[in-house]
């Protein structure tokens, strides 16, 4: 855990071939600077690193991180990602990833962003569809989750801070997720609707 420091270059990890977790979020960087990974460090981490948090680091490109093929979770929120094609290309390389946080990147505002990211991640989603170990999926500024109903092996899902507004759709989807034991929905517009809590509890009653 190296968050909240003044690290600008991730280096010196060439001998950490068993490192699985690296949290290096919110570095205090010079104006115009972004967090950078030394190629030698990346070469070492590519087959071992599973959990990476590089949020709040002014990062505008993740092409260099495509080699991190052992990743299962990555937090990229509050960076400067703008290139949707590059993002999708990288997601296709991360075939073991089950959690990606992308909130508050400029790319999230592009037309068709959500659909393209889901398509890019389709291999991963289908791979884990029947996997009982799947716990978390993508944070994508959702306004609909209908196309996720088929993920029937889900046990936990974090949907907080999205744009869900349709209570009927939400309840219908919850009824399909019969293995789910944890759902986070905080800070969605749907939470403000009348009778929201009761309807969600009823929809989840089979699981409960």
Image (spheres, rainbow, N blue to C red):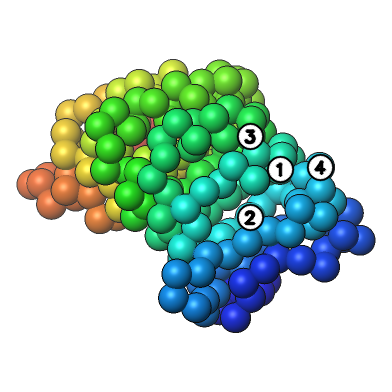
Q: Are marks 2 and 1 in contact (CB under 8 Å)?
A: yes
Say which mark, if any, is on residue 94. 3
Question: Residue 152 vs residue 51: left or right?
Answer: left
Secondary-structure class at tag 4: loop
- Label 4 or label 1, whichever comes before in sequence order: 4
Which mark sits nearer the N-terminus, 2 or 1?
Answer: 2
Q: CA distance from mark 3 to mark 2?
A: 12 Å
> x and y percent of residue 61 in the render?
52, 48
Q: Which residue is mark 1?
A: 68
Looking at the image, residue 12 lies above or below residue 118 = below
Quarter of the picture holding the N terminus: bottom right
Between the residue at mark 1 and the residue at mark 3, the CA separation in whole angstroms equals 7 Å
The residue lying at 22 percent from left, 40 percent from top is 164
Drawn side of residue 2 relative to residue 57, left or right? right
Residue 20 visible (yes or no)? no
Residue 118: image quadrant is top left
**Mark 3 surroundings within 10 Å by alpha-carbon count, few (fewer than 14), some (14 through 19), many (20 or more):** many
Which of the labelled discs sits on residue 47, or is there none? 4
Camera-nearest residue between 20 and 128? 20
- Pointer 1 and pointer 3: residues touching (CB < 8 Å)? yes
């Amino acid at each position: 855990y190296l968050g909240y420091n003044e690290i600008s270059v991730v280096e010196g990890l060439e001998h950490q071939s068993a490192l699985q977790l690296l949290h290096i979020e919110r570095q205090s960087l010079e104006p115009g600077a972004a967090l950078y990974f030394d190629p030698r460090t990346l070469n070492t981490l590519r087959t071992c690193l599973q959990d990476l948090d590089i949020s709040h680091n002014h990062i505008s490109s993740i092409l260099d991180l495509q080699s991190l093929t052992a990743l299962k979770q990555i937090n990229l929120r509050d960076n400067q990602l703008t290139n949707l094609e590059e993002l999708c290309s990288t997601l296709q390389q991360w075939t073991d990833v089950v959690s990606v946080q992308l909130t508050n990147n400029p790319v999230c505002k592009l037309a068709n962003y959500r659909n393209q990211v889901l398509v890019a991640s389709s291999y991963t989603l289908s791979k884990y569809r029947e996997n009982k170990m799947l716990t978390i999926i993508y944070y994508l500024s959702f306004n609909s989750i209908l196309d996720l109903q088929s993920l029937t092996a889900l046990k936990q899902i974090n949907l907080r801070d999205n744009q869900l507004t349709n209570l009927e759709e939400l309840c219908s989807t919850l009824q399909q997720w019969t293995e789910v034991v944890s759902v986070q929905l905080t800070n969605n517009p749907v939470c403000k609707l009348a009778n929201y809590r009761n309807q969600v509890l009823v929809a989840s009653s089979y699981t409960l």
